[in-house]
């Protein structure tokens, strides 16, 4: 696999207090040359609209850099937030890291 993949693993609650830190990690990944960024939500217990906003801004930054952003391992609360805001149509969401790796092979 020739693509440069960067995995970002936020944890706890992804809200306004962590949004800036999250966007900074995305920007660092872009600057380091990542072609694919995977946000693994395995350790995120809750996300609010501020966290979702940070994710949308991250997606714009990643696309502007010519890279791709994927999401995996979301819990039921985050899935409902994505579905209620129709963001499940904007982001490509995988059940697990392994599922993304299979797609990229």
Image (spheres, rainbow, N blue to C red):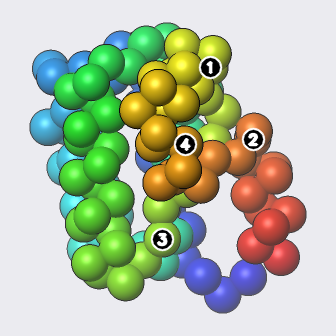
Mark 1 and mark 3 lie on one chain; the one further toward the N terminus is: 3
CA gap, disc 1 to disc 3?
22 Å
Percent x, y of residue 47: 38, 19
CA gap, disc 1 to disc 2?
11 Å
Mark 4 and mark 3 lie on one chain; the one further toward the N terminus is: 3
Asked which secondary structure carries label 4, the reply is helix
Q: Residue at x 55, y 20 (%)?
A: 80
Residue under label 3, please give it.
Answer: 68
CA gap, disc 3 to disc 2?
17 Å
* Above-or-below relation of 54 to 68: above
Side (left or right) of 52 relative to 91: left
Residue under label 2, please give it.
Answer: 96
Tell me if mark 1 has few (under 14), some (14-19) or many (20+) residues whose alpha carbon lies within 10 angstroms of its own. Answer: some
Asked which secondary structure carries label 2, the reply is loop
Percent x, y of residue 88: 54, 42
Of discs 2 and 4, which sits in the foreground?
A: 4
Percent x, y of residue 79: 58, 25
Q: Residue at x 81, y 52 (%)?
A: 99
Residue 75 marker: 1
Mark 3 and mark 2 lie on one chain; the one further toward the N terminus is: 3
Mark 1 and mark 2 lie on one chain; the one further toward the N terminus is: 1
């Amino acid at each position: 696999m020739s693509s440069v993949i960067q995995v970002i693993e936020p944890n706890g609650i992804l809200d306004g207090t962590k949004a800036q830190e999250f966007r900074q990690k995305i920007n660092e990944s872009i600057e380091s040359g990542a072609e694919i960024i995977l946000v693994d939500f395995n350790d995120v217990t809750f996300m609010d609209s501020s966290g979702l906003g940070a994710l949308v801004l991250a997606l714009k930054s990643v696309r502007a850099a010519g890279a791709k952003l994927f999401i995996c391992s979301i819990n039921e609360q985050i899935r409902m937030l994505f579905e209620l805001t129709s963001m499940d149509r904007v982001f490509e969401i995988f059940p697990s890291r392994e599922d993304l790796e299979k797609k990229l092979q």
